[in-house]
Amino acid sequence: MLVSYYFFRAAFPHPEP
């Protein structure tokens, strides 16, 4: 599921601390 999370972040980059 870590890969899916990575792709999700790449598709929807949101600024987080």
Image (cartoon, rainbow, N blue to C red):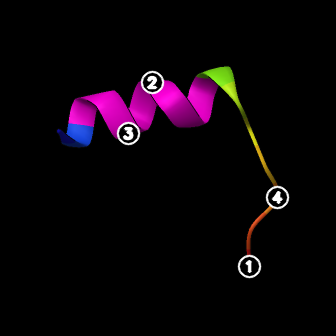
**For residue 6, what is the image quadrant?**
top left
Q: Secondary structure at mark 3?
A: helix
Left or right side of 6 for 13? right
Amino acid type assigned to the residue bearing label 1 in the image: Pro
Q: What residue does disc 4 label? A: 15
Amino acid type shown at disc 3: Tyr
Identify the amino acid type marked 4.
Answer: Pro
Tell me if mark 4 has few (under 14), some (14-19) or many (20+) residues whose alpha carbon lies within 10 angstroms of its own: few
Which percent across, then down, holds residue 8? Answer: 51, 30
Q: Residue at x 60, y 26 (%)?
A: 10
Q: Main secondary structure of the magenta part?
A: helix
Of marks 3 and 1, the one in the foreground = 3
Residue highlighted by disc 2: 7
**Looking at the figure, which quarter contains the C terminus?**
bottom right
Identify the residue under disc 1: 17
Marks 3 and 1, how far apart at CA: 17 Å
* For residue 2, side relative to residue 4 (left or right): left
In the rendered image, residue 15, in percent from the top left (x then y), is placed at: 82, 58
Farthest-out residue, right:
15
Which numbered circle lies on residue 5? Answer: 3
Give amino acid for label 2: Phe
Give how far apart the Cα atoms at labels 3 and 2 are: 5 Å
Q: Residue at x 31, y 29 (%)?
A: 4
